[in-house]
Amino acid sequence: MPETHNFLSQLVGSFAVPAAENPTVAMVEAAFAHHGIDARYINCEVAPADLGAAVRGAKAMGWLGFNCSIPHKIAVIAHLDSLAESAATIGAVNCVVRRQGRLVGENTDGKGFVESLRTLADPKGKTFIVFGAGGAARAVAVESALAGASAITIVNRDPARGRELVALINDKTPARGDFVAWDKTYRAAEDADILINATSIGLFPDVEGRLDLDLASLRPAMIVADVIPNPPRTLLIREAQARGCRTLDGLGMLVNQGVIGVKHWTGVDVEPGVMRRRLVALFGA
Ligand code: NDP
């Protein structure tokens, strides 16, 4: 008798990797194997026009849920039954969970980042600088604000996108949001506690991509984080370490959003180290 499997899927692969293997599939399947979870995680590429049909198909086949990535994170909302609170605030969904036969949209990107940050510091009362105003920046900024950040400065090239995120922070979270147009070299304020690259600068193959940031404004008391998972040791991370800052790479966020996703789908608390080791095998340390 063949085994029965519950199928999970991310609808589109999102990360550029030198290997043919999809990193999220590799990471989640490693956790399933380690914990003996009888489920599979598969990757499906879905064209935007077919998104509704794909979601109905996943529901019809009884999938536990799925991840979705660019370009589906916003568009998928129209096909779901409801949204969890932070997904509604962020306005994007990266993780869908079947609950009592209904598909609920969650956003685990920002939660994954905050989990990673907590290994170094409590976000409560801290002052943040976030570069970027896209999907990753929205998730990181909103979850950091909901976790108690006191002030968040959004530094972005496109002022309209940057201001929209600042308005979201000010209207929907207890934190104070400010916008700085990124049209010249940015100098971090002396009282900043946590600085985060949430742009795509530095993502493979742009591995020498450099933020237009005055490195002399980084102080050893700061935590510097990068959302880029590949390569884990981005130029920003290396330069911040050289200045004595504590750092967080993008693998932590990727692993933690995976841990949260698997918990939503299966109820199992998986061992993050298993997922991280699988990613390190793909991306290098
Ligand atoms: P988006 O396309 O939504 O946003 C990209 C952001 O980067 C925008 O703010 C854009 O600015 C900015 N940007 C890109 N290139 C430049 C540049 N040359 N100079 C200045 N700003 C630039 O992408 P996402 O937010 O979804 O993803 C961003 C990164 O986050 C990706 O590299 C992805 O790998 C990573 N990510 C990591 C996750 C993890 O778990 N570790 C999870 C999700 C994403 P502008 O608005 O001006 O165009």
Image: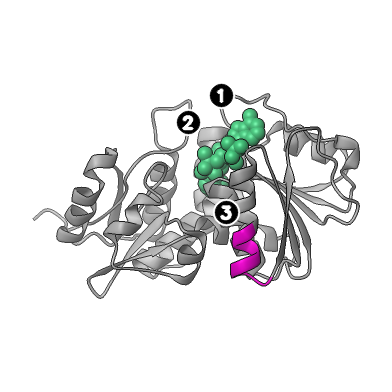
Where is residue 189? Give x, y as percent.
87, 50
- The range drawn in magenta is 167-174
**Looking at the image, is mark 3 or mark 1 nearer the viewer?**
3
Q: Is residue 134 left or right of residue 129?
A: left
Q: Which mark is residue 3?
A: none
Q: Quadrant of ligand 1?
A: top right
Mark 3–mark 1 CB contact (< 8 Å): no
Q: Which mark is residue 205?
A: 1
Residue at 79% over, 32% down = 184
**Mark 3 surroundings: few (<14), some (14-19) or many (≥20) residues within 10 A:** many
Q: Is residue 255 left or right of residue 179?
A: left
Which SS class for mark 2?
loop
* Residue assigned mark 2: 16
Residue at 56% over, 24% down = 205
Tell me the quarter of the image containing the C terminus. top right
Where is residue 9? Give x, y as percent.
30, 50
* Residue assigned mark 3: 138
